[in-house]
């Protein structure tokens, strides 16, 4: 998965890049059809805002989430949890839960 990280009013340090990349590995573990991810880090007065858009293969609408927090790392953690739930839900939707012909023959 290709990861792009941009900062608005925030310097994107190497530590932030490594932290976000580490969190993205979790999504790839759950679902392997992720194409790219774009993260935007913002500082709005006192609040740190993190938003992410993940392009998924076979889906026209990307997965999107945003989080506001007083700490950038806490916002990234909350965003990772939110995105992880959405990726799992998407995987659950696209997985075929019907019994295949071979499994039906074994059971019947």
Image: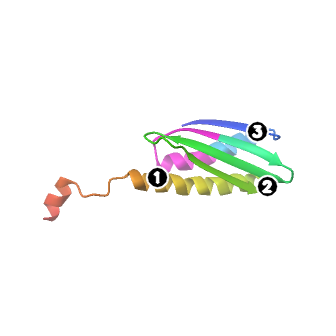
Which one is earlier in the sequence, the residue at label 3 or at label 2?
3
Q: Is residue 26 magenta?
A: yes
Which one is earlier in the sequence, the residue at label 2 or at label 1?
2
Identify the residue position indicated by label 2 in the image.
Answer: 71
Q: Residue furthest bottom?
A: 108
Q: Is the N terminus in the top left, top right, bottom left or bottom right quadrant?
A: top right
The residue carrying pointer 2 sits among few (fewer than 14), some (14 to 19) or many (20 or more) residues within 10 Å by Cα, namely few
Residue beneath the point at 69% across and 51% down: 76
Indicate whether 33 appears above or below 79: above
The residue carrying pointer 1 sits among few (fewer than 14), some (14 to 19) or many (20 or more) residues within 10 Å by Cα, namely some
Separation of residues labelled 3 and 1 (CA atoms): 28 Å
Q: Position of residue 100 (x, y in %)?
A: 22, 54
Q: Position of residue 80 (x, y in %)?
A: 62, 53
Indicate which disc residue 7 carries: 3
Separation of residues labelled 3 and 2 (CA atoms): 15 Å
The residue range painted magenta reads: 22-38
Pointer 3 and pointer 1: residues touching (CB < 8 Å)? no
Identify the residue position indicated by label 1 in the image.
Answer: 90
Secondary structure of the residue carrying numbered label 3 = strand
């Amino acid at each position: 998965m290709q990861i792009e990280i941009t900062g608005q009013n925030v310097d994107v340090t190497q530590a932030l890049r490594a932290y976000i990349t580490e969190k993205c590995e979790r999504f790839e573990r759950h679902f392997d059809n992720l194409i790219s991810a774009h993260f935007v880090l913002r500082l709005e007065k006192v609040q740190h805002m993190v938003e992410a858009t993940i392009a998924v293969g076979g889906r026209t609408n990307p997965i999107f989430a945003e989080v506001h927090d007083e700490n950038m790392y806490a916002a990234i953690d909350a965003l990772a949890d939110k995105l992880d739930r959405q990726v799992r839900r998407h995987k659950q939707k696209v997985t075929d839960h019907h019994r295949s012909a071979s499994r039906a023959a074994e059971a019947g």
